[in-house]
Image (cartoon, rainbow, N blue to C red):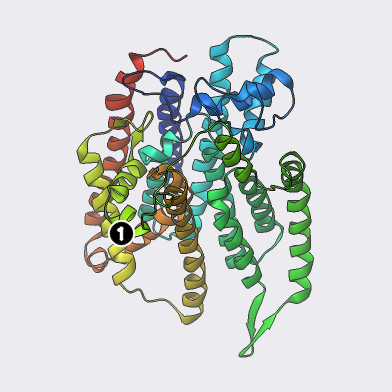
């Protein structure tokens, strides 16, 4: 009976994702729609990259004129290209059967819908490993997948969607490795995750560092009261992972080095290219203002918090205020429980869990630090989508904090079920309101192309 119930929940979970994601992906416009600006942020510029790949069957350099979009005098060709390559070659295949501009756009978007579906599935696997309680496990899955802003990232052309999938793969690999040892299974997940992350989104590179640290710690064992490091196994499996990763990612950095005069990443070349058009991007740093003045004297944190929860279109479509209040209260309660409430576990499990949690915390801090740095030094953009690589670790801490609350262990199973149903219903209702009540009516007023 439990298996049948479990299957029903999985089906509902995945179908709800597809219905909501496809609704947004098939209705939001591509171009600027004044005055509503309900098109996804920068998608019209990003889309030029997979469109170029579709038309030419080759990768562009960031300088290509075809990548310029309307008045934008810089391109996304300088960034990591793997997400755009997958979209571009999928479009190229579809282009064998139709020349429809709309179908090609949908093809590119549906690649990210697929990435989101795979991320949702990986979240299921992660939840099973992290939480013994079915209630908390499903709460974790629903929070990760149905946070409105999380789902939004899987509906338009961007590298964030593949980045979230790569993070999920690495987290799952780390968990399996720490619990079961780094056999071939966790090594495969880590390898694939690192490759996809390295070629998708720089803000998520903290996961690569954490994967290396957790992998190394997995070969440290305590035997007869003494710690031993299994060097032979570590070097054998580590060399295999390193070789596969370098083999799969080195082409991108070598290509950047050759194209951009030694700039492996390409971002410095991009900024210089922007300046060559006489465009001056003023920032707090260039104006001599302090970092504190940006963080404390502006709406930086409120804007980031709101747009992390739900902010569709070009940061123009907001959902109901009750949705923001619901999530902020839920987040605050979970974080409070995580920080201030204790749990009883064995010393052996405690050290392993703390090490894992420290690494997940690092995966939250890293994108936050990079986002603040970019806003201060380059372009002031307090947007929650830049923090999305931290989604899975953050939701883990929130859910773990909720189950650590003393009140949770004092109430009856029936009361727990009621609370769980209310919270999950709030998550689903928040998503439905955001997609179908606030966003879709605006989309329907504008043409997709």
Which x, y percent locates residue 119?
52, 42
Residue at image coords 35%, 33%: 315
- Taking the image as drawn, is residue 44 in sight? yes
Residue at image coords 44%, 49%: 286
- Quarter of the rendering containing residue 58: top right
Which x, y percent locates residue 144?
42, 46
Which x, y percent locates residue 391?
44, 50
- Quarter of the rendering containing residue 385: top left
Q: Nearer the viewer, residue 47 or 427?
A: 47
In the image, residue 172 sits, relative to residue 22, either above or below, namely below
Residue pointed to by mark 1:
334
Residue at image coords 32%, 30%: 316
Q: Is residue 67 left or right of residue 312?
A: right
Q: Nearer the viewer, residue 313 or 87?
A: 313
Mark 1 is surrounded, within 10 Å at the Cα level, by few (under 14), some (14 to 19) or many (20 or more) other residues, namely many
- Taking the image as drawn, is residue 417 in sight? no
Which x, y percent locates residue 251?
76, 43
User: Quadrant of the image for the N terminus?
Assistant: top left
Specify the farthest residue to the bottom. Answer: 225
Residue at image coords 44%, 31%: 41
Q: How many marks?
A: 1
Q: Kindly state the secondary structure of the residue where label 1 is placed.
A: helix
Q: Is residue 118 left or right of residue 425?
A: right
In the image, residue 174 sits, relative to residue 304, either above or below, namely below
In the image, residue 166 sits, relative to residue 314, either above or below, namely below
Q: Nearer the viewer, residue 379 or 335?
A: 379
């Amino acid at each position: 009976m439990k298996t049948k119930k479990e299957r029903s929940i999985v089906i509902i979970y995945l179908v709800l994702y597809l219905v909501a994601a496809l609704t947004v992906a098939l209705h939001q416009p591509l171009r600027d729609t004044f005055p509503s600006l309900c098109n996804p942020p920068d998608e019209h510029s990003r889309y030029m990259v997979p469109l170029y790949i579709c038309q030419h069957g080759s990768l562009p350099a960031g300088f290509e004129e075809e990548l310029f979009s309307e008045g934008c005098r810089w391109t996304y060709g300088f960034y990591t290209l793997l997400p755009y390559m997958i979209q571009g070659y999928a479009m190229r295949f579809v282009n064998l059967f139709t020349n429809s501009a709309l179908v090609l756009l949908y093809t590119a978007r549906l690649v990210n819908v697929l990435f989101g579906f795979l991320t949702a599935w990986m979240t299921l696997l992660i939840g099973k490993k992290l939480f013994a309680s079915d209630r908390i496990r499903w709460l974790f899955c629903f929070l990760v997948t149905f946070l409105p802003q999380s789902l939004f990232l899987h509906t338009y052309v961007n590298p964030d969607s593949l980045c979230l999938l790569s993070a999920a793969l690495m987290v799952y690999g780390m968990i399996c490795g720490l619990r079961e040892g780094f056999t071939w299974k966790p090594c495969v997940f880590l390898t694939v995750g690192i490759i996809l992350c390295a070629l998708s989104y720089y803000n998520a590179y903290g996961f690569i560092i954490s994967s290396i640290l957790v992998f190394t710690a997995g070969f440290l064992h305590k035997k007869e009261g003494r710690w031993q490091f299994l060097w032979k196994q570590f070097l054998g499996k580590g060399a295999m992972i390193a070789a596969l990763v370098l083999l799969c990612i080195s082409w991108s950095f070598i290509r950047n080095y050759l194209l951009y005069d030694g700039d492996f990443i390409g971002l410095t070349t991009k900024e210089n290219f922007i300046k060559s058009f006489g465009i001056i991007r003023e920032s707090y740093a260039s104006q001599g203002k302090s970092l504190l003045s940006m963080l404390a004297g502006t709406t930086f944190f409120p804007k980031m918090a709101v747009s992390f929860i739900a902010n569709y279109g070009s940061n123009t479509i907001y959902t109901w205020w009750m949705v923001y209040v619901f999530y902020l209260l839920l987040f605050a309660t979970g974080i409070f429980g995580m920080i201030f409430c204790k749990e009883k576990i064995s010393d052996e499990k405690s050290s392993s869990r703390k090490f894992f949690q420290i690494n997940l915390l690092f995966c939250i801090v890293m994108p936050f630090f990079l986002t603040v740095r970019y806003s201060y030094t380059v372009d002031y953009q307090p947007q929650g989508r830049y923090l999305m690589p931290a989604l899975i670790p953050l939701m883990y801490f929130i859910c773990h904090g909720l189950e650590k609350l003393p009140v949770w262990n004092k109430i009856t199973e029936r009361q727990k079920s009621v609370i769980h149903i209310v919270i999950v219903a709030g998550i689903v209702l928040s998503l439905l309101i955001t997609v179908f009540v606030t966003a879709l009516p605006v989309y329907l007023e504008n043409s997709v192309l």
